[in-house]
Amino acid sequence: MLWLKDPSEYFDEKPYLEQNLNFKIGVCVGDIQARAGLAQSVISGYLLTMQKAGLLESERIGKWTYYRRNEQTIQAFSEYIKNNL
C-alpha cells in the first residue's frame, strides 16, 4: 500500500509516459511483482484481496491491470480504527 501512495518514489514512470499513461491510473501488476520479488500469482492474489476489501481500485488497459489506492476507503477505515478501537 505504501508503494502505491507515491508510486513515483518506488517505480519508474518512464515506461508509463511512453505509453501516454501516468501513475494516476495505478501501477501495473508486473511492476509491483518485480519490486516485491514474489511470484506474480501471489501478488495478484494479495492485490485482489485488497481490492475486494475496497482498499484498492483497478483498471484494465489491454492485457495489463493497474492498481491504485482507494483513498476514500482508506481514510474511512483509518477514522473507524481511530474512533472505535
Image (cartoon, rainbow, N blue to C red):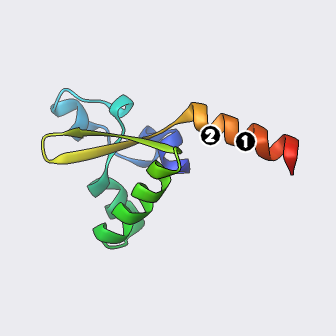
Task: Check residue 3 in the rendering and tell me which mark sits there, or answer none.
Answer: none
Say which amino acid is labelled 1: Ser
44 versus 61 height, above or below: below
Place residue 67 in its image quadrant.
top left
Q: Secondary structure at mark 1?
A: helix
Residue located 83% across and 43% down the image: 82
**Position of 51 compared to 84: left or right?**
left
How far is the residue under mark 2 from the one under mark 1? 6 Å
Residue at numbered disc 1? 78
Q: Residue at x 46, y 51 (%)?
A: 52
Circle 2 residue: 74
Q: Which residue ends up furthest to the top in the rendered image?
A: 20
Left or right, 68 with respect to 82, comes to: left
Q: From the viewer's perspective, is 72 left or right of 63?
A: right
Give the total of numbered labels. Answer: 2
Q: Position of residue 22 (x, y in %)?
A: 31, 30
Q: Residues within 10 Å of mark 2 (few under 14, many from 20)?
A: some
| Vertical position of residue 22 compared to residue 1: above or below | above
Q: Residue at x 56, y 49 (%)?
A: 2
In front of the other: 45 or 37: 45
Q: Is residue 11 left or right of residue 85?
A: left
Measuring from the top left, give residue 45's x and y in whole percent.
38, 65
Residue located farthest toward the left when viewing the structure as drawn: 62
Mark 1 Cα-neighbour bin, 10 Å: few <14, some 14–19, many ≥20: few
Please give the name of the residue rendered at 53% of the width and 50% of the height, measured from the top-left corner: 53
Report x, y in % for residue 58.
35, 41
Looking at the picture, which amino acid does disc 2 mark? Ile
Q: Are marks 2 and 1 in contact (CB under 8 Å)?
A: yes
Helix or strand or loop: what does disc 2 sit on? helix
The correct choice, above or below, for 31 with respect to 70 in the image is: below
Question: Where is residue 81 drawn, in percent x and y?
Answer: 79, 47
